[in-house]
Amino acid sequence: MAGPVRVCPECGRQFEFSDPAWRCCGVPMRLAAPPAAPVPLGQLAGRPLTTWRYAEALGVPARWWQPATLGEGITPLLPAGDGISVKVEYASPTLSFKDRGVVLLLAQALAAGASRVIADSSGNAGTAVAAYSARVGLPAEIFVPSSTSPKKIAQVRAHGAVVNLVPGNREATAAAAISAVESGGAFYASHVYNPVFHLGTATYAFEVWEQLGGRLPDTFVLPVGNGTLVLGVTRAVAGLLAAGLIPSAPRIVAVQAANCAPLAAAWRAGSSMPLAVDASPTIAEGIAIAAPARGAEILAAVDEFATVTEEQVLAGRSELARKGWYVEDTAAVCWAAARAAGGSWGEVVVPLSGAGLKTGWTPASPA
Ligand SMILES: *Cc1c(COP(=O)(O)O)cnc(C)c1O
Ligand SMILES: [Zn+2]
């Protein structure tokens, strides 16, 4: 077993797992095949309580993932009222769902024989790459927008990674990282460009399937910035359908901040390409992506888009905290959207994608 194969959607060229190439024909690669399905429910009992209980579906040899894992996965799934269940993704080793994908990027860096790693991020992917690079003993350099929450930057530094603060928007940060990668010698641990990341995020849906006793909810409500969770979940659904483990696909609803919604705007306009939008700042920093590199791919994968205002995000954040879940602003968008939908999406699962301690927010006024 040599690991998952990537393919260029333009020219069809295939790339082995151990090949560090990160782009072809100027566009992001895709997985050559959706993940295989997990083994049937009965056989999962007794396996490790991490994403590696789905090792067959991920298809990465143990000699690459075993040195990289920090025990990611198997986050709690709990009913939270109004037909909405929350999946507590901030109960992950670096406090966000990015760990699911980043462990695979570092497994691939090992397979490729990399000697150092570069990544760019609005925060959480950077903290995850820093931690998992430390785990495998590779030096890492992380590019983040200078507006990134100080606690995320501190976390990256604590793992021994070099932080490069880039002025301007998220796109400027990506451009700076890419130019450092092109100058040679480093493995680009990109959650945006590397589709191996989607195999990791597919485990989110495998877990929900297992936690619900072998079925999926009516609707997955998911945040979308670069679409890594959305694309992983849609791949997982394809794998479960192909294996006959679910009878039909759940509805996929993707949520953007109204202040930065190139994909929701495209969906409303019936466009298959993201629209150029005049983005204004949003407290949902983790999904403030004005020009998503996989925009067309995300639009094709999603059934419905929703947007939430800044006020809705703040209200959702408080509401979750009053129920016992302290999340960062970005992690409140799906809850806010599901509450606004008022039950029209049926049984819903939303991720609590990142931790409140990463931004350390305080309530506006004492209760
Ligand atoms: C990365 C992130 C998102 C959005 O994920 P995309 O893959 O960019 O769509 C949502 N919430 C949190 C907390 C994140 O870190
Ligand atoms: Zn190509």
Image (cartoon, helix red, strand yellow):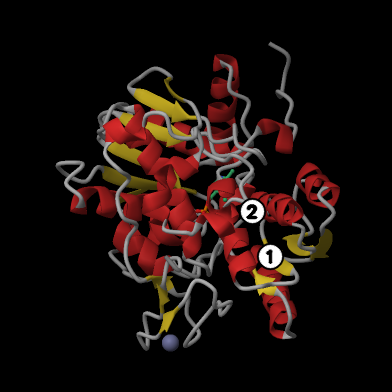
Question: Does the residue at mark 1 contact the one at mark 2 (Cβ under 8 Å)?
Answer: yes
Locate the C terminus and report the quarter of the image it occupies: top right
Is disc 1 placed on a helix, strand or loop? strand
Crowding near pointer 2: few (<14 within 10 Å), some, many (20+)? many
Badge 2 is on which residue?
A: 125
Image quadrant where residue 269 sits: bottom left
| Coordinates of residue 156 in the picture (x, y in percent) | 78, 51
Q: Is residue 272 visible?
A: yes
Instruction: Mark 1 and ligand 1: say if the CB distance to the nearest ligand atom is below 8 Å.
Output: no
| Coordinates of residue 167 in the picture (x, y in percent) | 79, 66
Instruction: Mark 2 and ligand 1: say if the CB distance to the nearest ligand atom is below 8 Å.
Output: yes
| Coordinates of residue 229 in the picture (x, y in percent) | 46, 50
* As drawn, 78 above or below 203: above
Name the residue type under label 1.
Ala
Image quadrant where residue 219 sits: top left
Image quadrant where residue 82 sits: top left
Badge 1 is on which residue?
A: 119
Which one is nearer the viewer's eye here, 29 or 265?
Answer: 29
